[in-house]
Amino acid sequence: MSRQLNIDTLRQNFWKEEYLREKMLHCEWYRKYGLMVKAKQKAKAAARLPLRLPTLHPKAPLSPPSAPKSAPSKVPSPVPEAPFQSEMYPVPPVTRALLYEGISHDFQGRYRYLNTRKLDMPETRYLFPVTTSFTYGWQLGPPVKQELVSCKMCRIESFFRKNGAFALLDPRDLAL
């Protein structure tokens, strides 16, 4: 008993094109932001490594000075800390101060801080789009208020399809 596949060449070509488009989108994002993400991951990994302190040897009793040494001994230096790079810009001090004023129960403190941060556009908070869903609204700008057209016929003509419900879509009807 085999399963009936309800797929024709049109649908098969659609899925092939959709798959390729998604793959290209993924490759484009990786080309654009891949190096920054890798650098951030390396910085996080370096920050997770335990800090190695130099070993302290017990002090030897003072002895008469011997012949001068030609090269001074090197003391192992601590591992230099890698600068931790976040995916977000630092918070302005005025906004950060909201955290410490009052409590969330009184709509202050963390509640007010988060609501203030929510009002900022993503471009002012993040260095780059973290997820692919960010690309939809990235650098969109402030919302533009459009006046509502009061002409009833204009709304009807722009709302309904001109070529019937089940007809093939006209390219002029699609918003791409």
Image: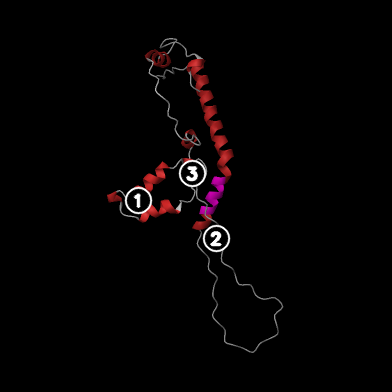
Q: Which residue is mark 3?
A: 124
* Circle 2 SS class: loop
Q: Amino acid at mark 3?
A: Thr
Residue at the image position 54 percent from the left and 75 percent from the top:
56
Q: Is residue 96 above or below residue 151?
A: below
- Number of residues whose C-alpha sits closer than 10 Å to that of mark 1, classed few (under 14), some (14–19) or many (20 or more): some
Residue 136 visible from this viewpoint? yes
- Number of residues whose C-alpha sits closer than 10 Å to that of mark 2, classed few (under 14), some (14–19) or many (20 or more): few
Q: Choose the circle earlier in sequence order: 2 or 3.
A: 2
Q: Which residue is mark 1?
A: 110
Q: Which residue, as the protein is rendered here, is positioned at the far bottom? A: 64
Q: Determine whether label 2 and label 3 are within 8 Å by CB.
A: no
User: Secondary structure of the magenta portion, mostly?
Assistant: helix
Q: Which residue is mark 2?
A: 81
Residue at the image position 55 percent from the left and 60 percent from the top:
81
Q: Choose the circle earlier in sequence order: 1 or 3.
A: 1
Q: Determine whether label 1 and label 2 are within 8 Å by CB.
A: no
Q: Which residue, as the protein is rendered here, is positioned at the far right? A: 70
Q: Amino acid at mark 1?
A: Arg
Residue 59 painted magenta: no
Q: Is residue 142 above or below residue 69?
A: above
* Circle 3 SS class: helix
Segment tinted magenta in the rendering: 36-44
Disc 1 from disc 2: Cα separation? 31 Å
At which x and y percent is residue 153?
A: 39, 12
Q: Is residue 77 above or below residue 170?
A: below
Q: Amino acid at mark 2?
A: Glu
Disc 1 from disc 3: Cα separation? 20 Å
Which is more toward the observer, 151 or 54?
Answer: 151
